Image: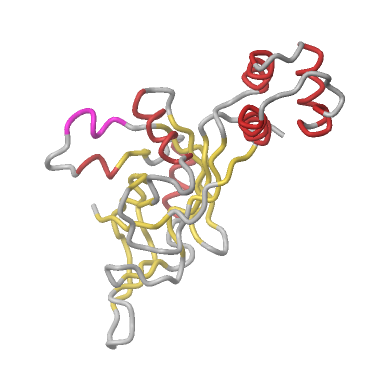
Amino acid sequence: MQTIAAMLREVRFQGAESAMTFDGYGAVFNNLDSYGDVIAPGAFKRTLRESRKAGSWPSMLLQHGGGFFSATAEDLTPIGVWQEFVEDEKGLRVTGKLADTTRGREVHTLLKMEPRPAIDGLSIGFIAKKWNAGTKPEEPRRTLTDLELIEVSLVTFPANPLARVDAVKSGHTIRHAERALRDAGFSAAEAKAILSTGFNAAIVERDAGVDEGTATALRQLISTLT
């Protein structure tokens, strides 16, 4: 099995309708990677069609399971599931959900770190079925036209600078935000008003003050839900 790695470019928070999920590109078409290979559009078409038919998706691993010859059972245990794979004009778009386990929560925390994610790569593990070999020095070593996708990993050290994770969705829910507001001293009615109208608009009508540190933390929490 071979691998192609890709960097995470940006992590941004979105709504929490699906906790601990993220989106991005596992591979980008027509981009020369560090191994000298290029993936052609349509290279995943067959493997995705067969996966949908079988109802069995490629695995989500961390660091490719640590290497198949030295990996432990824990290394090869998935950290979540891939929910969707789509080929678009850019490449292989992936949507994944991390497991609510120690390793899944750890990865989610690393993805959400500021000012940048602590883990910043995606990488595909595949078996090359068809390719065209380059014949000139300026051509890619191989243009991959048909790949059997085995797994897609979150990795620390990427090779391809164009395939990225675009979004990480928060694990928080509206209930978490309401509880945080109540803990900060708001009534149940005030908490509901803030969540429905926005923090800045609702806080103006409240007599009691909130310190700026608490206000900033609450704004960040609410921004992930609205």
> Count of labels shown?
0
Q: Position of residue 208 (x, y in %)?
A: 78, 18
Residue 119 falls left or right of residue 3: right
At x 25%, y 40%, the residue is 65
Q: Quadrant of residue 163?
A: bottom left
At x 29%, y 88%, the residue is 136
| Residue with the most extreme left position | 70
Compared with 148, 112 (above or below) is above
At x 44%, y 37%, the residue is 54
Q: Quadrant of residue 56?
A: top left
Question: Front-most of 193 and 15?
Answer: 193
Compared with 51, 9 (above or below) is below
Q: Quadrant of the C terminus?
A: top right
The majority secondary structure of the magenta stretch comes to loop
Q: Position of residue 15 (x, y in %)?
A: 65, 35
Report whether residue 16 is seen. no
Is residue 76 inside the magenta stretch?
A: yes
Residue 155 falls left or right of residue 54: left
Magenta-drawn segment: 72-77
Question: Front-most of 196 and 104?
Answer: 196
At x 32%, y 58%, the residue is 4
Compared with 189, 37 (above or below) is below
Q: Position of residue 170 (x, y in %)?
A: 56, 33
Q: Position of residue 135 (x, y in %)?
A: 27, 85
Compared with 197, 193 (above or below) is above
State how the image is colored: secondary structure
| Residue with the most extreme top position | 188
Report whether residue 30 is seen. yes
